[in-house]
Image (spheres, grey):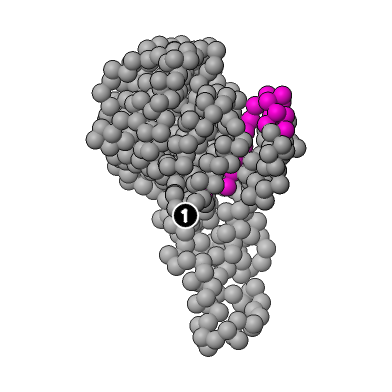
Amino acid sequence: HFSTHTYGMTTDAPESILTHYLFEESGTISNTHRTCHILGLPYDIWYLIFALTWAQTTPPKQHDFPIVISHVCRLWRQHALDTPGFWTSLRFKRPIPAIDKYSTWLERSKASPFDLEIGWPPFEGASVKNAKAIMRLIFPHVHRLRSLQVRDVPFKIRQLIFDRLNNAHLPALETLDVKWGWAFDERPSPTERKFKPFCYGDAPNLRHVALERIQHDYIIHKFNKLNTLDIISWDVLGNSSHENAKTIQDILSLLPDLRTLRIDREYFPDSNSIQLTFTLPPVTHSSLEDLYLNASQDDINTVVCALNPPSLRHLGRSPGVDLPISISCLPTMAQARPSHLFPNLVNLKLYRRPAYGEPVIDSRHMECFERALAGVSQLESLTLDGVNLEGKKHLEALTRTCPRLKRLVFIYCSGVVLKELRAIIYSRRDSKGMGSNSLEYVHIDGPKWKLRNLHKEATEHGLGEDPEFNITISKYNPHRIVVIGSE
């Protein structure tokens, strides 16, 4: 990701730099038609062009981009060598570590913070020699280490790396990314080993941590100013949903500034109780904006009802993948205690598994549907999966709630009637009502026979002739009808 701060760029916006250059002399538009040879460009403009090009270059060419531009001509080489930010990415992911090459890069980077990535190829034979050479290279510059990534290396190599950093003072370190090695026969197992980085040193500005099958307890107790925490491990949660929710509550309580939390359990039971009793008092966390939870449905339901994060915007299994929340959570979401659970949430997926549902219980939960939606006034995307909408009874709630809603998706829901859906959409647009024209995308997914019936219904009622709607069966997904929007 390109940022002006990361690459040492001037704080002026790109448009400001170009405008200043084009209008500096005359201040008139006519002067913008002048031409300039690329070798005559001011350094700021040159830097802007190449920094943006570098940011848009895909790996692995991106890493070698500074070398490429420094071999074009004498002037470009001088500009490249005069830009420390071009030489701040050190990657040891080949069998023979490029010690001499990166020694030169560290010199060229001058006082700029640098990023270090260490992968498994230099240690295929568990080469301690290579690990020591890498640490000897970076240690004189460790005070300006900005990010450290150690992934897939054997345990003894990882241990050597962090032993060398035990007493280090790392004022520039912002990001730590560690993944366990691939030596499956090692004992004890990787998740049982204590991981205590920088235990006699410090990293006061550490803000982003990602751990894969690495113990997290020490990290969250020592570094309590984290903004991002990503934990992937099969044993991060246990068998009790109640205890798992308590674990996540404890993590949030220890990290008051956390904005993004991702917990990926990897392997979990496929559980989904008919009805759950949530006994945990909810924990309020004011900073959390993104929560990603890959766990069992019971874990998800219990965690959601045990949190009160007023700033939360995204709920997902992973970024871009919605988190299915059972309709059994609706009564809790509908409560104002003293405020609703998710006042700033922008995406919500409500879920019911028909094979496990009981009509009476489901109906009781859906009675809270409108009150729950009233508490998510910033919602932009709503997905209903397997929910019984009972005709217009529950859909009418959308005429009074979610004024910012852009995306509405029905997945194998019962009780969806196109005529009623159209009436509800018109009602949302009515200036005498909500006056919201926000909906851009409405899809209905279901079995082919049901979609054929819905399409027939649309034809019989002349809905397909309505220019406001695009009621067609998808060309790319035969199990989908497009009501509003494109494919």
Vertical relation: 1 (above or below) 50 = above
Q: Residues within 10 Å of mark 1 (few under 14, many from 20)?
A: few
Could you tell me which secondary element the residue under label 1 belongs to? loop
Q: For residue 441, what is the image quadrant?
A: top right
Q: Which residue position holds label 1?
A: 431
Answer with left or right where residue 207 lies relative to residue 65.
Answer: left
Question: Which portion, as a residue range, is magenta?
Answer: 438-456
Q: Report x, y in % for residue 376.
A: 39, 39
Q: Report x, y in % for residue 244.
A: 36, 18
Question: Quarter of the image containing the C terminus?
Answer: top right
Answer with left or right where residue 67 lies relative to residue 433.
Answer: right
- Callout 1, which amino acid? Ser
Q: Residue at x 44, y 49 (%)?
A: 434
Q: Residue at x 39, y 48 (%)?
A: 144
Q: Residue furthest front?
A: 461
Q: Residue at x 42, y 51 (%)?
A: 113
Answer with left or right where residue 404 lies relative to residue 413.
Answer: left
